[in-house]
Image (cartoon, rainbow, N blue to C red):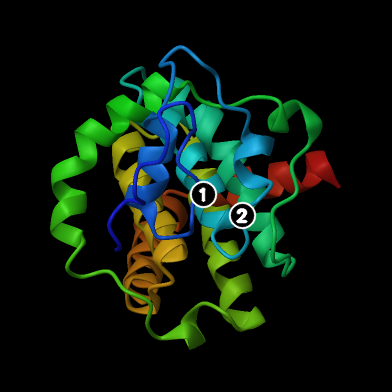
Amino acid sequence: MSSPPESGPRDAAPAYRNEGIRTLLEMFAWGDPAQHMKLGQILQDLQQSAFGVFLFVAILPSFIPIPGLGGAVSGPLVILIGLQMLCCMRRPWLPGFIARRGPKRGTMHRFLDRIDRPLRRMDRMLKPRLPQLLKPLPAHAFTGALLVLLGILLSLPIPFTNYLFGFQLLLFSLALLERDGALMLVNWIGALAAIAFFGFSSGQLVSYTVELFQRWF
């Protein structure tokens, strides 16, 4: 990861220059902690990192220590992201009611404080590599399919799994933000293991997926 951008005038917010998640978090933390950041505005100027940013914001509710609440909010957002990647879209599309909403800067700041130490350790490991696991449409779509299944699992009332799936999805977000194919490969393996263990072993994933498709289609 690169260091945060140089500070400018006090009355100007630092611009996000696609330098990785730490720069992104610094941008989120700037300004009035009570200010709501609209997701549509956050994503409008981003290019290759847009899905990573969207996923990062989407998983924040999964770390709320209230059973059922985090998954009910984060799960459908993760499914939306996964479906768009599965359909080989290169940039996310946001319905208006989602684009007009977003986290408070203070929430982003607190989350930065909580994950600051692990991120500093990962600074030395994450870097752009193995683009064949990120850029080609089949790889992009496969990542999307896994995100759909993980989003469904996150939505299910499986006890004590919000943090687990939230952390796993955070790693997906990091891989997309840093263009790190090696981390994405690790994510694929971890996601397949989680899907097999929590989903197909209990039968909940299959039944809930069928119910979703029947409801939407």
Closer-to-camera residue (203/5): 5
Which residue is more in the foreground, 38 or 163? 38
Please tell me in which quadrant of the rendered image residue 84 appears. Answer: bottom right
Circle 1 sits in a helix, a strand or a loop, which is it? Answer: helix
Q: Earlier in the sequence, mark 2 or mark 1?
A: 2
From the viewer's perspective, is the residue at label 2 or at label 1 nearer? 2
Quarter of the image where one finds residue 40? top right
Question: Which class describes the residues within 10 Å of circle 2: few (<14), some (14-19), or many (20+)?
Answer: some
- Residue 46's disc is 2
Residue at 44 percent of width and 16 percent of height: 32
For the question of whether residue 32 can be seen, the reply is yes
Q: Is label 2 in contact with label 1 (beta carbons under 8 Å)? A: yes
Give the vertical position of 29 relative to 186 (above or below): above
| Disc on res. 53 | 1
How many angstroms separate mark 2 from mark 1 (CA)? 9 Å
Disc 2 residue type (three-letter): Leu
Give the SS element for disc 2: loop
Q: Amino acid at mark 1?
A: Val
Taking the spot 80% from the left edge, 31% from the top edge, the residue there is 96
Q: Nearer the viewer, residue 186 or 200?
A: 186
